[in-house]
Image (cartoon, helix red, strand yellow):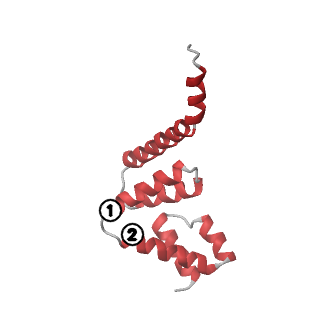
Amino acid sequence: MKIEELLSAMEKEGGARPVTMELLSQLDESAVFEHASNKQWLFSKTAIPNKYKLLMSITAAAAVGQENCIKTYVKSALRQGIQKDGIMEALLVARFVSATTVISASVDAMKLLVEDGQTN
């Protein structure tokens, strides 16, 4: 398979050619093939249905703020028949997890506040 065929297959699956893969192909075609191979390997596993892997991908991309990935995964999910409410719920999970990390990262600061002993 040639790089153009791979990019076209990605476009067919996701509804648009992924900008990141397009750019990466101009810098190192082998990295695009490696990425595609990793995805194929992951989605060949059967313990988690592929629908849920895709929703998990949306959640993870949203939690780390990767806009291009979010958009690519959402387009793919829609094309694969995943309902909008399921996609929205995945985004809400990401919102919750991201907010939780703020609290978790603040443990030492909260300890200082508790040790200070002042109340409202």
Tag 2: Cα neighbours inside 10 Å, few (<14), some, or many (≥20)? some
Q: Which of 112 and 42 is in front in this view?
A: 112
Q: Residue furthest top?
A: 120
Q: Where is residue 6 in the image (x, y as percent from the top left)?
A: 53, 78
Q: Residue at x 47, y 45 (%)?
A: 94
Q: Residue at x 62, y 80 (%)?
A: 29
Does dot 2 land on a helix, a strand or a loop?
helix
Horizontal and vertical percent for residue 90? 42, 47
Task: Please report the residue visible at 60 percent of the width from the left and 81 percent of the height from the top.
Answer: 30
Badge 1 amino acid = Ile
Residue 43, numbered circle: 2
Q: Where is residue 78 in the image (x, y as percent from the top left)?
A: 42, 56
Q: Is residue 104 above or below residue 81?
A: above
Which residue in the protein does label 1 denote?
48
Q: Is mark 1 on a helix, strand or loop?
A: loop
Q: Quadrant of the C terminus?
A: top right
- Residue 21: mark: none
